[in-house]
Image: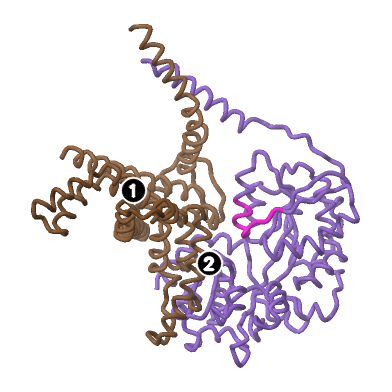
Chain colours: A purple, B brown
Amino acid sequence: MKLKPLAGGLLAIALATVAGCSGSSSTPTNDAPDAGTITVKGYSGIFEDVFKKSVIEPFQKKYPKIKVNFVGSANSAENLASLRAAKNSPDTDVSIMDISTSGTGNKSEVFQPLDPAKVPNMKDIDPRGKVEGNFGPALTFDSLVLLYNDSVTPAPTTWDALWDPKYKGKVVVPAQPDIQGAGLMLIENAKAGGDYTKSVDQGIARLKQLAPNVQTWSPQPDSYTLVQSGTAALAVGWNARGQYYADESKGKLKVAIVDEQTIFQINTINLVKDSPSPAAAQTFINYTLSPESQEAFTEAMFYAPTNTKAKPSAKALKRTALDPAKTAEILQVDWTQVAANREKWTQLWRREILAN
Amino acid sequence: MSAKTRSARLTVLGLTVPGLLGLAVSFVLPLAWLLRMSFNRGDSTGLIEETFTLDSYAQFVGDSYYWDMAWETTLLGLGVTVLTIVVSYPIALFLVRTESRFKGILVALAVAPLLTSSVVRTYGWLVLLGNQGVVNQALMGAGLVDQPLALINNRLGVYIALVEIMMPYMILCLLAGFGRFNPELEHAARSLGANRWRTFWRIVWPLSMPGVLTGALLVFVLTISSFVTPRLVGGGKVFYLATEIYDQATATLNWPFAAAIAFILLALFAVVIVIYQRALRRIEAQ
């Protein structure tokens, strides 16, 4: 057969390529703590804009020899998926994502522990934001809130507003596996007396009743835009972004911190395993956890600081998840458990809630 | 073997090798990697265990939910294909027949939407069909409805957007198919007493079948593999195989399961292509 040498050649090239991919590509590690280029991956959009201005720019002034590139990612899962795809030759040094997803990254060796000597600010992190094994700790605290359009009166004070028949087809809830949907389910489950570590049936049953009111479970481009434009009347969303957009939209979108339990959302800042510049990366992480950087980010975007020594203005603090008047209302959630149930709950949502 | 045929064969080989190499590296290898991935075991936290198991396939086959999803995907493919033929055929026929001096411009206009990415066009539909979009505002303004109709965030929206996105492909295929068509045949049929309707069904339609079939194949395959439009317009309420692959790969991070569904979708493609080739052979034999 004429084709045989050809097929053989193809196979040889194929094998060579595979070997090339999996072979140990020893990237020279740049180990200077105050020089080099680092790549940071985090949420795109408004988070990126504010983070660049209030964290990266001041950092570059302090460490002019470290160049920081920010790469945006639509959400935490996508962030982790891209890091995992590049696991053999990482091009990213630092990654910011939700704690329920970074836990998977820690377990699957996408991330590596930090060196406490290089990240001394770690010791001042709030106990709720510390991660076992010196893995990337909490960078921000946030909480689930109710977003509403200024046409909604009176201002909602409880999650129950979402179920009001008045808002049929006007409610937006990003569905599980998005943790905003998961959070609402956990809150309702607890409210009905359930314990999510055993079952979420009560939360599911409650959300099933919500379905007729829901315009979309997958808001495009996001909940904030839909509520601001009046396409939707009510939505669940995150406090920090909500507060920011409330200012931006001059009150078209409003934030209700309800008089009930809510959940905490934690973003962690993580060091990628085999990061090309681990020393400079940890210098950067240490800076983001410093009181000065934490205060700046809180003032700019209302994420609550995780460093206990950070002292933002009372005015800004009052609009964060750590509003001193509200801390008793946080529902304790074990995010590792949420991650472990991700697929099971997603299937439950699909079959019980979304199909209606 | 003569020297001439040998050198001809070498030429053929020389010309095909670069393409084959490109395919091997960019298509066959990733596919092999994907196949291997589908036999790993994924868990719900997104961890992947390297092993050899049929778990992911069993999970799909053993769950009626996924059979429904495969069925809905097939229905979407068929539905969008038929609707696209219905709306594109008259346009293509007009474009072939017209003697307007703007013919070139009209053809260019018909396929111009291809210049815009389908993501942008999908967002366009979100704006047009939304509660505050032009369509609903016009209907309410005319007093035809008092509540905005739910035109997006459901299956209906997915069909509307996909049909529009697929139309240029179908029109292009139909135009290419009509190229073979000799208008004299139509005149002959009319002069022999066939009415317009009969002429269309007996002459025009059968002769355009190769174009219709090629367009149908292209549209069907593009539809069942499209995930951006169903995802953006579906409002998180409708699920198809392609959106499921995306969700499993990037949201639940269960790569083995995503890989397994990808191969099941590939099998569906294979079935469709076999049907297409049978149909084409039958038509050409006639």
Circle 1 sits in a helix, a strand or a loop, which is it?
helix
The residue lying at 87 percent from left, 45 percent from top is A35
Relative to B103, say whether A226 is above or below.
below
Q: Position of residue B154 (x, y in %)?
A: 42, 70
**Whether residue A240 can be seen here:** yes
Q: Nearer the viewer, residue A316 or A56?
A: A56
Quarter occupied by the N terminus of chain B:
top left
Q: Position of residue B285 (x, y in %)?
A: 17, 37
Q: Is residue A72 magenta?
A: yes
Relative to A113, say whether A328 is above or below.
below
Query: Which circle, 2 or 1, is nearer the viewer?
Result: 1
Label 2: which residue? A176
Q: Which residue is at the far left?
A: B193
Q: Which residues are magenta?
A: A71-81
Quarter occupied by the C terminus of chain B:
top left
The three-letter code of the residue at mark 1 reads Leu
Left/right of residue A135 with respect to residue A235 in the rendered view? right
Marks counted in the figure total 2
Left/right of residue A276 with respect to residue A163 in the rendered view? right
Label 1: which residue? B175
Relative to A284, say whether A129 is above or below.
below
Q: Nearer the viewer, residue A251 or B108?
A: B108
